[in-house]
Image (tube, helix red, strand yellow):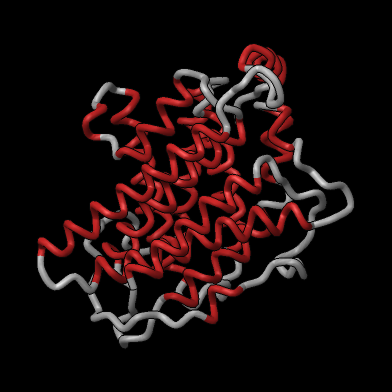
Amino acid sequence: MQRLIRTVTTAALVAALFVGAAVPATAGDYDDPFFLGWTQFLPAVETDFTATTENDCPNGSNHCVDNVIREMTRRYNQLGCDHDAVFAFTYLLTTEEYRNAVEDPNFFEDNAFVNHQDAVFADYYFEAFDDWHRGRIDQVPPAWRIAFHAGENEEITGMGNILLGMNAHVNRDLPFVLAAIGLTKPDGTSRKPDHDRVNDFLNEVNQYLLNEAAAVHDPTIDDGDVPGTTIDNSQSVQLLASWREGAWRNAERLANAETEAEYLAIAQEIEDEAALIGIGLRESYRYNGVTNGDTNARNAFCAANWESR
């Protein structure tokens, strides 16, 4: 299993460097023919049922998602044109698309539980965000430190900011969230079908997400657009699907750890791998003054186009 996780994670890094600024060109529905929902065919590893150890939104109502969106909006507005804002913007739009999806009470097998997960997952980002911005740097996970430091020092492109945030939140945070709230239902069946179902609305939001970020924060974000095709959309979604599959597998490893020492060793591997991917992304998307724009032009563009949400 450990070999599988390392293979998925390494492949994700290679994919990230290949994708660059690729973005979707056209809007569509959740059945984009180029989206390959391959993760649903990978079996879940059997784990014992563990009741949630997190307390956010235990009833799983849609109002919990509304509360998350309000908190995300508040933080996004607080950032303005800070380079951290581009990830905050894309995360906000993604959560808004999720809220649209769960208007259908049957979108997931267990909408309420996934709403609960959404709230817990967002709190991991909020906690890292608050610790960084209040100077509690030692409390910030390494992958998030890399992302926030690159944003604060305006070191990388807007696409780099997005990918660094995604890496920290998916490759680092998500395994711990999944393991904490439980991978199986009370009847012993796996929650992985709902985990994989998330990829459907991620596919939808990705068809406009980066175009909107480019229109507000950094015009270079959509430089990889291929008009009239969905090839670029598929690349971006498959990267995220790969990261989410790796997160599930790492959560299984955490859940199946037989001793505290084994759990801590797995947790350290997750931290180290996410940090390593973050370092690679940071170097790949660093401003070079030649081919990927510059921070002054980006700041001026945002100042002219940014609006609160």
* Left or right relative to 29: residue 46: left
* Left or right relative to 227: residue 73: left
Camera-side residue of 288 and 259: 288
Where residue 152 appears, as percent x and y from the top left, is 45, 20
96 above or below 302?
A: below
Residue shown at 49% from the left, 77% from the top: 193
106 above or below 198?
A: below
Where residue 25 appears, as percent x and y from the top left, is 81, 49
279 above or below 30?
A: above
Q: Quadrant of residue 21?
A: top right
* Left or right relative to 192: residue 86: right
Where residue 100 appears, as percent x and y from the top left, is 62, 57
Residue shown at 57% from the left, 72% from the top: 107
228 above or below 249?
A: above
Camera-side residue of 171 and 272: 272
Q: Quadrant of residue 301?
A: top right
* Left or right relative to 219: residue 309: left
Where residue 263 appears, as percent x and y from the top left, is 18, 62
| Farthest residue, direction right | 228
Residue shown at 22% from the left, 62% from the top: 53
Residue shown at 66% from the left, 71% from the top: 36
Figure quadrant of the C terminus: top right
Label count reads 0
Figure quadrant of the N terminus: bottom left
